[in-house]
Amino acid sequence: MKYWFLALIITFNIAGIAQFDKYFHDKTLRMDYYHTGNHESEHYFFDELIEEPYWGGSKINLVDTFGYGNYYLKVYNKENDSLLYSRGYSTLFREWQTTDEAKKIQKAFSEAVVFPYPKNDVDVVLYSRNFNGEFEEKFRHTVDPDDYFIRKDKRINFPSFDVHISGKPENSVDILILPEGYSKEEMGLFIDDCNAFSEGLFSYAPYDKNKDKINIRGVLAPSADSGNDVPGKGVWKQTLLNTSFYTFDSERYCMTMDNKSVRDMAANAPYDQIYILVNNEKYGGGAIYNYYNVSVNSNEKAAQIFIHELGHGFVGLADEYYTSSTSYNDFYNLEAEPWEPNITTLVDFNSKWKDMMKKRTPIPTPDTRKYRNKLGVFEGGGYVAKGVYRPVHDCLMKSFNGDTFCPVCVKSIQEMIDFYSK
């Protein structure tokens, strides 16, 4: 029985890879576009297509099964309208839409989606999730893979190096670490920090049991200056990725608006996740689902910061805290179920972790000593104290008081690892 099941898996994998080879080349096509608007509106404008030499994703799980993200990419076969590839993702633009600034001005953000390089004409379609949680088609572009205007030049060309390699890119979660604010003389420090990143990642569950499913690489790309921008302190640095603290005027939020530089540097190696490691001891970071992750290298909380941010960028986990100040307004619609797996408004709790709870645990769950270490439904999360609920009293997605993820987050992380590695 065991050998029959193994043979079935092997047959399935071969069939899946054959499907990939039928429709795609083993490299990436990137579509850059501009996402513009304000608090109430959004518009899309095509920018350019770029060929990248590696494909880091699965060759079997080409169609997204999670439904996460504020946006959705679908790639259709132009000939018969069959779905070839899909992925959910989020962006910095959506976060900006919830800020006070978005009520006053219009703004444009450079964004990108990537997918396997098609062999024939495809329709690339982008969807946006509305406030009620429903996806709406917003943009459609037909791609001719033989178009000679598709760029093939490497704009940021640097060597990559292996930190932890367990298998082929298509059978692994590929994390690519990009250096930010490391000078030429500090490349040795960056290599050491990448090794520390790897050791730290595998010290947390469930990553510790999945070392054989994860690849980690770095890119040796020095910046002119050491450190990065801290506008609130009058600090400005010349760096390759242009990261900055005080994103959306939140001191600890460290991100970059320079999407093109991030993607151009990432093109030097196969990747599923882009992780920007900032050479700064200041507390901060940030991450957006299937967009990019950012954390600092030398703060005393650096290990917890990067594991927390990877929860956002890789798995789509929500912040479970609600007492810290943010720049967001009305981030979640309390009349709709949020897409993130680790928070709920109880609108559709059956789709979340209800099946993981003990039947006698009350819903909502009192945040008392009796339920302190139990899986429940605790009010407060997603930046608000009322109307949004989290799975446990505390978790690495809520605070750094402990060193563990809750059972819901662990399950979500494992499911995402399996999706990219199986």
Image (tube, rainbow, N blue to C red):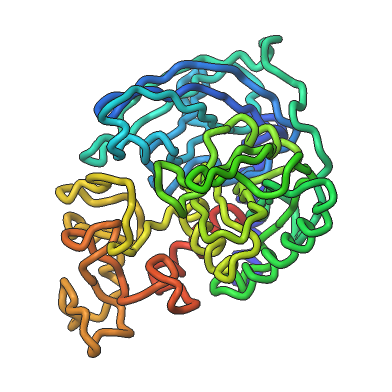
414 vs 169: above or below: below
Seen as rendered, the residue at the extreme front is 234
Rendered location of residue 201, percent (x, y)? 62, 67
352 and 156: which is toward the camera:
156
400 and 363: which is toward the camera:
400
Q: Quadrant of residue 298?
A: bottom right
Residue at the location (67% across, 60% down)? 214
Q: Is residue 274 left or right of residue 127?
A: right
Q: The N terminus appears in which quarter of the rendering?
A: bottom right
220 and 247: which is toward the camera:
247
Q: Is residue 177 left or right of residue 404?
A: right
Rendered location of residue 275, percent (x, y)? 62, 50
Q: The C terminus appears in which quarter of the rendering?
A: bottom right
391 and 189: which is toward the camera:
189
Residue at the location (57% across, 73% down)? 204
Residue 58 visible at all = no
Rendered location of residue 241, percent (x, y)? 64, 38
Q: Quadrant of residue 131?
A: top left
Rendered location of residue 352, percent (x, y)? 29, 61
Residue at the location (54% across, 39% down)? 256
Residue at the location (64% across, 27% down)? 29
Residue 102 visible at all = yes
